[in-house]
Amino acid sequence: MRILLIGNGAREHIIAEKLAQDSEVYVIMSKKNPAIAAIAKEHWICNIENPQEVSEIVKNQIIGKIKIDIGFASPDGVLAAGVSDVLENAGIPIASPKKAAARIEWDKSFMRLLLEKHKIAGQIKHKIVNNEADARAAIIALDGSVAIKPLGLTGGKGVKVSGDHFTHIDEGMIYVHELLDKDGVLLIEEKVEGEEFSLQAFSDGHNVVAMPPVQDHKRAFSYDRGNNTGGMGSYSTGPLLPFLEKSDIDQATRILQAVVSAMHRDGVPFKGILYGQFMATKNGIRVIEFNARFADPESINVLALLDGSLSAIFKQIAEGSLKKCNFLVDSTVVKYLVPEGYPDNPKPNEEVKVNLELLKKLDAKIYYASVYEKNGKLLTTGSRAFAILGQGTTIDMAEAIAEKGCKCVSGPLRHRADIGTNDLIQKRVDHMKKLRER
Ligand code: AMP
Ligand code: GLY
């Protein structure tokens, strides 16, 4: 098959790599990712969040010249801009959600209303407010234990949680003001206590097929210190995470299925990847948010384990004939290498060198996120530079490979050495055990 992929990060690097196992991959990127360009049969550069620009490339350079079998728009901003719609309007079958369905991610009020309307499990107390008085009343009604968030996309960095980011209601109100000034509306949610996990699923508009659960690490520094980032790394341990029970995964999968069924009933069928960010609590699974795409970096954990053809799955999604998928039961650890100073004060344009030979010897894999080539050199931007993947029959093996893999890249980069270690995982297990005993 010939597959058109839109996107240029580490997530799209592994998607391209998997697709290229049995298909020709064509890619439209905002910036040239050298590793994706090396996989692609052909690539084009434009602002991929601008549907008009994507449409021009599709019309002028693709239609009538290359027969594309499937289109897949990958990042959140691209889906929110309606790029899947552009591809479909050009006659390309799509395996990613259209703008109306991706709304589950780009409009948190749509998501909360959907759960409410269809009485889907996992809902939490929340209030959508558009003025100061209602916001204050909502925070007081939840005893000050809240998460304050914008309704739209924030790259994982727009949420402020009491206890973590602010303590007194007046501090919370400063953020409320900021959001009211910017958007005129915001969401106040009860603060949920538990352990977070990501469950991604393929969906063809009717059925869902879940992938293995993964735990991401959003904080910049070891032991969850520092600001939130786009994600510093993630691990998986087969069909379950160490702090979860099978019933947790079953419950989360049922929630994903219920969402897909509800969206079908409402006339906005969801085709693509539905990624639930869930919290396991003492009272069961709660929904933090849904995303209309593969998670980053958790996509790397699960796609490394996918035992079969991603191209075939995309075709089934496009045709509405999704079947079961198989995943290896190995453990995986992904660690992001980020510029020093990231996320607050990253140092861009620094030269980095990758020792591919040594990575291969270690059995570690590297996925290029945000780096560019200039005069034969590889340089950083202000964003995450590379994701390093370790895979093994045990989490210890996977972690050791990922950690050694990080040492194969030289330059002013850092990573979180604690991700995937027994010490940190045990803390999650102990936390969950304490909550369940309460
Ligand atoms: P989001 O951008 O919605 O993924 O949120 C970023 C992070 O904020 C999440 O990964 C959670 O750790 C935290 N968070 C978001 N909503 C809540 C909530 N209602 N209760 C507790 N923590 C939350
Ligand atoms: N893993 C965080 C995200 O993809 O939004």
Image (cartoon, helix red, strand yellow):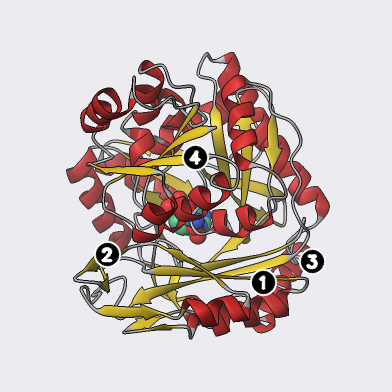
Question: In terms of sequence position, does the residue under pointer 1 or pointer 4 come before the other?
Answer: 4
Q: Nearer the viewer, residue 37 or 384?
A: 37
Q: Identify the amino acid type marked 1.
A: Arg
Q: Residue furthest right?
A: 246
Q: Residue at x 50, y 19 (%)?
A: 268
**Mark 1 crowdedness (10 Å alpha carbons): few <14, some 14-19, many ≥20:** some
The answer to whether the residue labelled 2 contacts the one labelled 1, judged by CB atoms less than 8 Å apart, is no
Q: Identify the amino acid type marked 3.
A: Glu
Q: Nearer the viewer, residue 314 or 192?
A: 314
Quadrant of residue 264 within the rendered picture = top right
Instruction: Provide the residue designation for mark 3.
Output: 437
Q: Nearer the viewer, residue 102 or 35?
A: 35
Question: In terms of sequence position, does the residue under pointer 4 or pointer 3 come before the other?
Answer: 4
Residue 24, label in figure: 4
Instruction: Provide the residue designation for mark 1.
Output: 428
Work out how far the residue at label 1 is from the one at label 4, CA to CA, in angstroms: 41 Å
The answer to whether the residue labelled 3 contacts the one labelled 1, judged by CB atoms less than 8 Å apart, is no
Which element carries disc 1, helix, strand or loop? Answer: helix
Quadrant of residue 429 within the rendered picture = bottom right
The answer to whether the residue labelled 1 contacts the one labelled 4, judged by CB atoms less than 8 Å apart, is no
Question: In terms of sequence position, does the residue under pointer 2 or pointer 1 come before the other?
Answer: 2
Q: Identify the amino acid type marked 4.
A: Glu
Residue 299 falls left or right of residue 377: right
Q: Identify the amino acid type marked 2.
A: Tyr
Instruction: Provide the residue designation for mark 2.
Output: 372
The answer to whether the residue labelled 4 contacts the one labelled 2, judged by CB atoms less than 8 Å apart, is no
Q: Residue at x 63, y 54 (%)?
A: 302
